[in-house]
Amino acid sequence: MLVSLKSVLTKARKGKYAVPAFNINDLEFLQAIVEVAKKLKSPVIVQTSEGAIKYAGMENLANMVKTAAKKDLKIVFHLDHGKDLKIIKKALSAGYTSVMFDGSALPYAENLKLTKKVVGWAHKKGISVEAELGAIKGVEDLVSVSEKEAILTNPKQAAEFVKKTDCDALAVAIGTSHGAYKFKGTPKLDLKRLKEISKSVQVPLVLHGASGVSSYLVKMIRQCGGEIGCAKGNSDSEIKKAINSGICKINIDTDLRLAFTAGVRCKLKRDKKVFDPRQILGAAKEIMEKVIAEKIKLCGSGEKL
Ligand SMILES: [Zn+2]
C-alpha cells in the first residue's frame, strides 16, 4: 500500500535504521525496486525528480506506482527536489504521499516562508513534506572553513527552521555531493555536525548525494567497458555511522543509473544479435536488483514492514 513518509520515517528513527529512497525514471526501475522490497520485506521510498516527470509524465509515473503498491508492500511515493510550486501542487493531487520542497538555494527567510506554505497545503491532505537546509555540493572542493560553514547545515538554524515550518523530514548538508563525478579527494561526512543537528532537531534527517559505488557495481561497470565516475563515493562504514547518528532516509539515484547502464552495456557487448528490448532492459533490471538489495542491507530496513 501507499503510506506517508512521516509514518515510515518515525518508525525508522525509533528503530535506528534508514529507509532507502530510490529514484525512478521508467517501469524497469520500479519493477526492480518492488521485486526486491517484497523479497526482503523492506519499506521503500519511490521518488521522482522534476526531470523524471518531464521525461515520463507525472500521470504515467503516478499510475505505475499506485498499481505497484500492493497490500504486502509499504511504498512512500515521493517528489524529489520539488522546486517549482506548480509541480508540487500537481503532485499533491496526483497521488504522491510525500513531497520535497527544495528551497536550499534561496535566502534563509525565503526558504522558510515557502516551506511553510507547502507544509500547509500538504498537511491538509495528510501528505508529508521533506525540506532542505544547507547546500549539498562538493565540500571537498572548498578550501576555507568559512566557505564550508556557509553551505553546511547549521544545527541551531535547523532547529528553528523545523519548528517554524513544521516539516516532517529535513535534508541536511554534511559533506555529500550529488552526481557521479563528484569528489577530487576522499569524501568525508561531518558526523560531529550531524550528531548536533540530530540532537537539536525533532524530525528524521535525510542524506542526499550519498552514492557509494559497491565493489560489485564497480566490477560490472568495468567488465562492460564503462567508466567509473564515483569510485570515490562515501564508504559504507561512513553511511552506517550516519544512520546511527540520525539519518533515516538515504537517497539513491546515481547508483541505479550506473547499474542500469552497466546492464545495457553488458548485454549489447556480449550479444551482438540481440534486438529484443525486453532482453536488453531485463539485463539492466538484474543488476539494479542486486544494487537495491545491497542498499536495503546497508540501510537495515529489511524485515521492517
Ligand atoms: Zn538530492
Image (cartoon, rainbow, N blue to C red):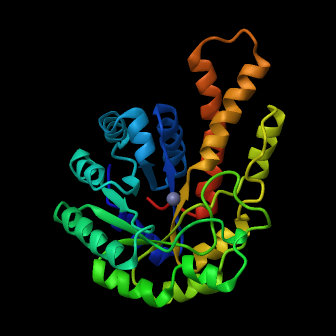
- The location of residue 108, given as percent across then percent down, is 39, 78
Question: What residue occupies the far left of the structure in this picture?
Answer: 124
Q: Nearer the viewer, residue 269 or 72?
A: 269
Q: Residue at 72%, 73% (x, y): give it.
A: 188
Q: Nearer the viewer, residue 67 or 233?
A: 233
Residue 170 x/y as whole percent: 43, 72
Residue plotted at (48% across, 62% down): 304
Q: Is residue 22 above or below residue 151?
A: above
Between 27 and 294, the one lying in front of the other is: 27
Query: Which quadrant of the rendered structure holds the C terminus?
Result: bottom left
Left or right of residue 74: residue 144: right
Task: Give me the residue at 35% from left, 72% from top.
Answer: 111
Position of residue 294 relative to residue 240, above or below, is: above
Q: Is residue 138 left or right of residue 115?
A: right
Q: Is residue 171 left or right of residue 82?
A: right
> Which of these two is toward me, 70 or 5?
5
Q: Residue at x 68, y 12 (%)?
A: 274
Of all residues, the one furthest to the top in this rendering is 273
Up/down of 36 relative to 45, above or below: above
Number of disc labels? 0
Q: Is residue 184 above or below residue 271?
A: below
Q: Position of residue 153 (x, y in %)?
A: 52, 79
